[in-house]
Amino acid sequence: MQAHNRQAAALGTFFSNVAVRRFAWQALAALALFGAVFWLAGNLHHNLAARNIASGFGFLTREAGLPIAEHLIAYTPADSYFRALLVGTLNTLSVAFWSIILATILGTAIGVARTSKNWLLAKLSSIYVDLFRDVPLLLQLFLWYTILQKLPPVRQALNPVAGVFLSNRGLSFPVLDWQAAHGWTLLAFVLGLLATTLYAKRTSRKQLDDGRARSFWPVAITLLVAIPLVVGFSLGASVALDMPQPKGFNIRGGATVSPEFFALLVGLVVYNAAFIAEIVRSGLESVGRGQHEAARALGLHPKNILTWIVFPQALRVIVPPLTSQYLNVTKGSSLAVAIGYQDIVSVATTSMNQTGQSIELVGVIMAVYLTISLSISLLMNIYNARVALVER
């Protein structure tokens, strides 16, 4: 009897342990989750079999027969569904990348303008934010697409700058007649950019150690301009441009951005720039006034105060919400289907109608956006760790 009591007491002591109870509840929750997933998967398989709907990703190797107007890689309707989905994914990445870059530039400029002491500039920036932030993105996309559709045809195309044409076919502009020598020139520029970055860090550390200023721009100009130019000219790189020319009902030569891509890009940039402007404004205003006064007491120019004193401190407040806004830009690009731009959602939806593989294709869409979002979060978290203030 005493042995039984000792065992019961030991068992009671074991389950009274906080760590044990936490592990037990987590194990039960995990079992319940796996059970629910297993039941849903079995129910899905049963329903698909009852309706004679094939499951799996074998359809990806079949001929798509799906025309895609814009593609960054070679594509024809005779290609497979896998390649069609890859083209749609690249289209999504393209519009998301350029939207993030341009929205960041525009939003930062408007956010800085909102903190300006110039009454007119600050008021106009405030009106911009209130106007575009409060109108749904989908309505703005319809607005920009309608405006582009009302542009004149190719024969009466607007020509605001030499070589640039704006018509209902989109925006056409000159591009470099790309050659192999241009690739080597670009490589020299990228390597020069990396070398310039390393040199700038090294000179900054040495200046902090001994207090002596060192010349930076001669080295930067040599690495970024002189060496790439020497490489380009030595390999015979041409600077000739492929100029667009209106011919008949279309424009030949150059590069043309379709009305669908242009409307989507403008809509995403204008809409998200309003949110980024507020993020930048709040970050700038989070820096104490004492920092401004101390910088002015040192005789710094207002531009240098913003660049060297305010912005580096404001970044710790700006970057976290800016990461969320970048994710919103990417996810907002899925509205492209509303104006006919063939991104991953549009291509997958058309593929669903042709194959009936709805579950698999919805999974593909989710996987694409999840991968893009996690990649953006990873890069921004790395950058955030670099700009965060370290307490000593």
Image (cartoon, grey):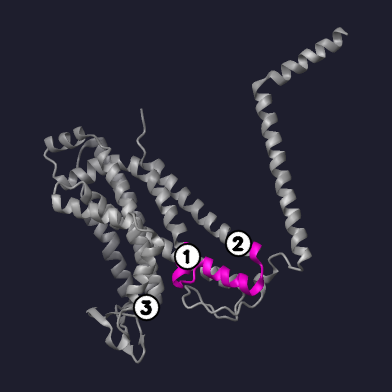
- Residue extending furthest toward the top: 2
Image x and y of residue 96, in percent: 43, 61
Q: Please, what is the three-letter code of the amino acid marked with disc 2?
A: Val
Specify whether 123 is left or right of 232: left
Label 1 element class: helix
The residue at which mark 3 appears reads as: 256
Specify whether 303 is left or right of 148: left
Q: Nearer the viewer, residue 94 or 242?
A: 94
Residue at 42% x, 65% y is 95
- Residue extending furthest toward the right: 1
**Disc 3: CA contacts within 10 A as few (<14), some (14-19) or many (>=20):** many
Q: Nearer the viewer, residue 105 or 115?
A: 115
Can residue 205 be seen here? The reply is: no
The residue at which mark 2 appears reads as: 362
Image x and y of residue 187, in percent: 39, 65
Label 2 element class: helix
Sequence-wise first label, 3 or 2: 3
Label 3 element class: strand
Q: Nearer the viewer, residue 36 or 223?
A: 36
Q: Is residue 20 magenta?
A: no
What main secondary structure does the magenta stretch of the protein show? helix
Q: Name the mark on residue 11.
A: none
The residue at which mark 1 appears reads as: 92
Image x and y of residue 39, in percent: 74, 49
Quarter of the rendering containing residue 64: bottom right
Residue at 77% x, 68% y is 52
Placement of 68 over or under 321, stated as above or below:
below
Q: Which residues are magenta?
A: 334-359
